[in-house]
Each structure stands twice: as structure tokens, then as C-alpha cells.
Amino acid sequence: PFLCSALTTLIFHSRGERLGSLDQTLTALESMANLHVLELVDAIPCVPDDQSSEHHSRSRVVSLPRLHSINLQGTASECASLLSRLSIKPFTLLILKGTGDKGALTLLDAFRHLVTHSLSLQTLRLYIGYYIHVEGWREVLNIAPEGVNRACAGLLLDGFAGSLSQLF
């Protein structure tokens, strides 16, 4: 009832409650062709353990033609799972925050694919330390201190324990 086709903005912050299964979430998103803003914080459906369900969901790609801002925050595997099933338009503002090591490389690969095929970025800033933080812009910038230039794409992997060689 709440997730209807008339919605233009869906912001859902949670502490454990999810939108349902991955298939249910994809079905709901498919019906929201007018969605402009999608923000899911700790509300992304868990990656299914059932391989047949995951295979079915993986073949589905949801197109949200009016979406101009997406913010996904949760475990890296949850973010990667949902992101890989969304068709992202070139001028969509993309913010991702994935926690934990499980699924981090998958999320990084999904982000890398978007950067190289969809987002048309010309400037990237990469922070590597206890976490990985990537920001991107669609124009060439003289990078100012953090917060001065608003990035159009961002990825934060908190708790990534992989090798730096896996990034490139």
C-alpha cells in the first residue's frame, strides 16, 4: 500500500527491518516508474541463500527512468546485490556505503562497472586506509578539501580487509 506507483521519493532508514525479500523489493521498485530519489539505509534485503532464488533475481534488472539520486547503505553484499539489479542512468547521483568484508569486492566491481560504463566521470578521488572511499565527478576538478566539491558518485567500503591489488 505505501510502495505505490505514484511515489517520487522513497527514503527508508531502518534498524533491521527490510523491505521484504529481494524479489519483493524488485517487484515494488518496478512499479515505481516515477521514482526520483531512492535511499535505503540498513533496509536493503539480505542476499538470498537459495541459489535458485538468487539466480532468478540476478536475471532481473529494474529500470527506474526518472531516478536521479540513489543512496544505498548496508552490508557490502546487500548493496552489491541490489545495485547489480538496477539500471543506473548516466546522470544519477550515486552514494554507496558497504560495510564488512563479505561482498566488498563484488560491490567494488559493480561500482567500477558503473564508473566505466554509465557515470561518465572525469575526476576520481581515492582514499585508502582502514576503509576505502572513492568519490567521482563528471568534470575535471582541482580537488579541494573534503566537502567543498560535492561528488556525483561515491563508494565507502568500511571493514575491507582485501589487498590493494584487488582494487585495480
Image (spheres, helix red, strand yellow):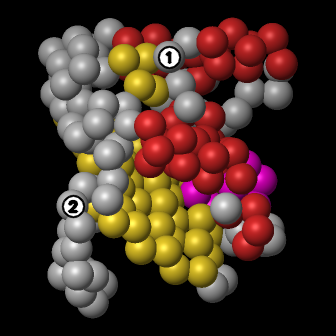
Compared to residue 143, the image places residue 125 above or below, namely: above
Question: Is the C-beta separation of discs 2 and 1 under 8 Å?
Answer: no
Compared to residue 22, the image places residue 96 above or below, namely: below
Give the structural element (helix, strand or loop) at label 1.
loop
The image quarter in which residue 51 lies: top right
Q: Amino acid at mark 1?
A: Val
Q: Is residue 148 left or right of residue 63?
A: left
Q: Is residue 36 left or right of residue 72?
A: left
Q: Residue furthest bottom?
A: 145
The question of residue 101 being in magenta is answered with yes
The quarter in which the N terminus is drawn is top left
Residue 23 percent location from the top left of the image: 58, 15
Label 1 crowd (10 A; few <14 / some 14-19 / many >=20): some
Could you say which disc has been placed on residue 139 in the image?
2
Q: Amino acid at mark 2?
A: Glu
Q: Can I make out residue 13 in this image? A: no
Residue 142 percent location from the top left of the image: 23, 81
Give the structural element (helix, strand or loop) at label 2.
loop
Residue 53 percent location from the top left of the image: 74, 13
User: Between tags 2 and 1, which lies in front?
Assistant: 2
Query: In percent of the image, x 32 and y 10: which residue is there?
Result: 31
Q: Is residue 49 left or right of residue 91?
A: right
Judging depth in this view, the residue of 111 and 97 nearest the camera is: 111
Judging depth in this view, the residue of 127 and 68 nearest the camera is: 127
The quarter in which the C terminus is drawn is bottom right
Q: Can I make out residue 55 in this image? A: yes
Q: What span is colored magenta in the figure?
A: 98-104
> Mark 1 — residue?
61
Compared to residue 148, the image places residue 15 above or below, namely: above
The image quarter in which residue 98 lies: bottom right
Label 2 crowd (10 A; few <14 / some 14-19 / many >=20): few
Query: In percent of the image, x 73 and y 72: which residue is there?
Result: 164
